[in-house]
Image: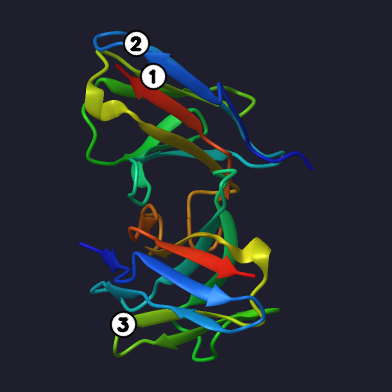
Amino acid sequence: AQTVTQSQPEMSVQEAETVTLSCTYDTSESDYYLFWYKQPPSRQMILVIRQEAYKQQNATENRFSVNFQKAAKSFSLKISDSQLGDAAMYFCALVRGNTPLVFGKGTRLSVIA
Amino acid sequence: ETGVTQSPTHLIKTRGQQVTLRCSSQSGHNTVSWYQQALGQGPQFIFQYYREEENGRGNFPPRFSGLQFPNYSSELNVNALELDDSALYLCASSLGTHSGANVLTFGAGSRLTVL
C-alpha cells in the first residue's frame, strides 16, 4: 500500500519570505510520480509541481521548487517570495502507473502581510 | 479550452435519500475520476471511468455508483445517504488512465451535506 504523510497541519509565512512544506511517503515501487496540489478557498485543486521518481533533478516551477530525496522518501515543497495568493491548503500526492492518486491530509498555509 | 465543471456546487440532503452529481470533463479528456474529500482530510479515490467503463474503484460501498457518457461527461450517484457521506466531491479528468503521465485537471467540487 502507498501512503503519504504531511506532518504539518498548519504553517505560516511572512509575505516575500520563503517557506518549506514537508511530505514523506511510502511505496515499494521504484517508478512513481509525486505531486504538490494547491487548494484555495475556491476548492479547485490546482497542480503546483510534479516530480518523476526516476529523474534525479528536482523539479522547479517559477517560485516553487521541490527537494526530492528518494532514499529517504521525502518530497518537500519550497515556496520562495511568498505572496498573499499562495495562501491555501497544500496537498502532497503519490501515484504509480494506472493506480489512483493517494493524497496526504494537507497543510494549511497562511501568508501574513 | 474549457476546464472541468461540476454541478451542483452545493446541496443538502437527508439520510436515506439519493443524490446525483454531475461532471463535464475538460475538452479532449477521455477519463474521469471521482474523489471524496471529507472536512480536514485529503481526497479519497472513489472510482475512475474510461471509455464509459468503470476502470478501478476505491474502498467505497456499492451504493456509490457512476456513469460515463459518450461525450466523456460523468455522473456520481449515491444511494441511501448516510451522515458520513457529507463531503466535498471532486471530479477530475485526464487524457488516459495513467495518473502520473496524464495530469489530472480538477473541478471545483460539489459540497454535499447530509442531515
Q: Secondary structure at mark 1?
A: strand
Looking at the image, residue A77 lies above or below residue B80: below
Q: Nearer the viewer, residue B42 or B65?
A: B42
At 25% across and 20% down in the image, what residue appears? B63
Q: Nearer the viewer, residue B110 or A35?
A: B110
Quadrant (top left, top right, bottom left, bottom right) of the N terminus of chain B: top right
Q: Are marks 2 and 1 on the same chain?
A: yes
Image side of residue A80 versus residue A88, left or right:
right
At 29% across and 16% down in the image, what residue appears? B115
Q: Nearer the viewer, residue B113 or A100?
A: B113
> How many angstroms separate mark 3 from mark 2 (CA)?
42 Å
Q: Pointer 1 and pointer 3: residues touching (CB < 8 Å)?
A: no
Q: Which mark is residue A38?
A: none
Q: Secondary structure at mark 3?
A: loop
Q: Secondary structure at mark 2?
A: loop
Give the tally of numbered discs.
3
At 43% across and 30% down in the image, what residue appears? B53
Looking at the image, residue A33 lies above or below residue B105: below
Q: Amino acid at mark 1?
A: Asn
Q: Earlier in the sequence, mark 2 or mark 1?
A: 2
The quadrant in which residue A24 appears is: bottom left
x, y percentage for residue B9?
A: 55, 26
Read off the residue under disc 3: A73
Q: Amino acid at mark 3?
A: Lys
Q: Which mark is residue B77?
A: 1
x, y percentage for residue B71?
A: 64, 25
Image side of residue B61 versus residue B77, left or right:
left
> How many angstroms separate mark 1 from mark 3 (CA)?
37 Å
Read off the residue under disc 2: B18
x, y percentage for residue A64?
A: 61, 78
Q: Label 1 is found on which chain of the structure?
A: B
Looking at the image, residue B90 lies above or below residue B41: above
